[in-house]
Amino acid sequence: MANSNAIIATIIISALASAVSLRWTTRVLSDWRLTRRLSGRRVVSGAGLALVPAVALTLVTAHVVGPTALTGPFASVQLLGIILAAAVGVAAELAGGHDGTGLFSRPSRPPKGRERVALWVKGIGMALTAWWVAHLLGADGLRETIAGGAFVFLSAHILSRVNERPGRTLKLYWALCVALLLCADSVTALRAAPVLIASLVLGPHDLTGRALLGDIGALVLGTSLGTMVIGAVASPAIHALALAVLVVGTLGLEWRPMSRLVDSVPALRVIDRLGVRGPAAGPDRR
């Protein structure tokens, strides 16, 4: 009973921390002029940065009220990973003029100047982040470190690659989270809760175009998801299968962009437009 109360308290505080963090972050990003034109008006881009302080506040709260699943070394590594991913995202936005060219992706035209710098910043920064997270999680040997880093790297790549339209990255992240939680235990569910709750608070803002998740948020969510897979999946066979799915997804998105795939499948088109309204209902950003 006491543990249940601690979990409920953590969830409530996580939601409140996410709301406060989002409000503060949008103000800061607006002052930094990290904005993007959407349907004729300027909106804050990179609101996904709010995920970092929201998760940090939740983990601090967990140290006070519990549960213990959010106070161990894994939680610290997860927090460090999303902080590094957010830093990479901010650096890339500033270096690339926050023009939404995507993470490690192949733009519709050859990248020039600041766009090229942004792609290099994202690629190298996330490769180092992925390797460091896998190393801290106790990967034994070079092979396991590379495999663990690939989970983080490719998860971040895929979520950033689909970030062509408001709500698209969040919907894919939620779907992947559900799939992971269906195969995981209660400890994994608790570990996923801080980022998942923060993303649910941010969701309405991204879906309506009031504040965009941006590549910063896509990197944070991808890093968190990859970290969760490393910690939740113990079977080498399932690890190999999950990694194969990520590789196939990455190659598929490079061969056929998400927007083209969505437009060609009616069911995906309905899901893609679900909940999207206001300025966010305009054309793709890329």
Image (spheres, grey):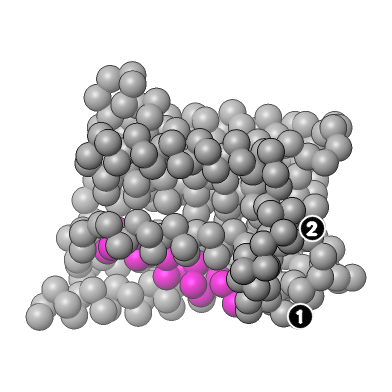
In which image quadrant can residue 112 be found?
A: top right
Q: Which mark is residue 285?
A: 2
**Is the residue 271 above or below the residue 189 in the image?**
below
Kind of residue sitting beneath label 1: Gly
Q: Front-most of 49 and 155?
A: 155
Kind of residue sitting beneath label 2: Arg
Q: Work out whether residue 168 can be spotted.
A: yes
Residue found at x 42% / y 51%? 225
Q: Which residue is mark 1?
A: 278
Q: Is residue 228 left or right of residue 138?
A: right
* Local crowd size for mark 2, using a 10 Å CA cut-off: few (<14), some (14–19), many (≥20): some
Taken as a whole, is the magenta stretch helix, strand or loop?
A: helix
Q: Position of residue 216 (x, y in %)?
A: 61, 51
**Is the residue 121 above or below the residue 265 in the image?**
above
In which image quadrant can residue 134 be found?
A: top left
Start-end of magenta stretch: 187-205
Q: Which mark is residue 95?
A: none
Q: Front-most of 25 and 223?
A: 223
Residue found at x 11% / y 78%? 2
Q: Work out whether residue 90 can be spotted.
A: no
* Residue lying at the far left of the rendered structure: 1
Q: Position of residue 110 (x, y in %)?
A: 85, 32
* Local secondary structure at mark 1: helix
Q: Earlier in the sequence, mark 1 or mark 2?
A: 1
Q: Position of residue 270 (x, y in %)?
A: 65, 73
Label 1 vs label 2: CA separation?
A: 15 Å
